[in-house]
Image (cartoon, grey):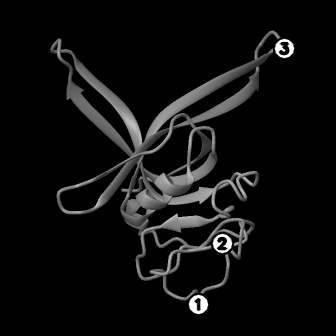
Amino acid sequence: MFNRVVMLGNLTRDCELRYLPSGGAVCTTGLATNRRFKKQDGSQGEEVCFIDITFFGRTAEIANQYLSRGKKVLVEGRLKLDQWTDQQGVKRSKHSITVETLQMIDSRGGQESGGVEGGSYGEPTGTPNVGYNNANAQKPAAYPKQTTPEYSGHEIPDIDINDDEIPF
């Protein structure tokens, strides 16, 4: 199965950082993204999507340190369905995104956000996390030295997909 979501939007609230009993960091916030379209009568319409997002590990600590309400970010991760029963016994559900990589988009953040602009962050996996826009993005010291070419966003990266995984 393939579960990958990429969203660009503005944070709807400040980040909330907490630590698990195991010592791992978890940061939650919300993301708003919009779509503009032309209605049948010719007028402009707008649809806004609000979704909760969750960061883990070092990415959570970076998000808490540099992000705040209104900041523009690009997140990539997986879609998750949360289900629970509320206090009245009604079953509830909502979708959220578990973020695997984060890119800070705001260029106006410069000095007020500690000097980090357009950085790309994610959990180290043995291969470097390549930024989409900024080849000189600051990365935490835990990242291995980059040995692969930068992804410019214009070419399509190789994806290893087994033919049995394609649904058609």
Binning the other alpha carbons within 10 Å of mark 2 as few (below 14), some (14 to 19) or many (20 upward) gives some
Measure how far apart labels 2 and 1 are at the Cα level: 15 Å
Kindly identify which residue carries mark 2: 137
Amino acid found under the numbered disc labelled 1: Thr
Amino acid found under the numbered disc labelled 2: Ala
Q: Residue 162: image x %, image y %?
A: 41, 69
Query: How many labels sit on residues?
Result: 3
Amino acid found under the numbered disc labelled 3: Gly
Q: Secondary structure at mark 1?
A: loop
Kindly identify which residue carries mark 1: 147
Disc 2 vs disc 3: which is toward the camera?
2
Q: Which mark is residue 36?
A: none
Quarter that holds the N terminus: bottom left
**Do the CB atoms of the residues marked 3 and 1 lie less than 8 Å apart?**
no
Q: Residue 2: image x %, image y %?
A: 41, 56
Q: Residue at x 56, y 74 (%)?
A: 139
Q: Which mark is residue 42?
A: 3
Quarter of the figure with residue 12: top right
Q: Residue at x 54, y 58 (%)?
A: 102
* Front position in the image: 5 or 102: 102
Q: Secondary structure at mark 3?
A: loop
Q: Residue at x 70, y 51 (%)?
A: 106
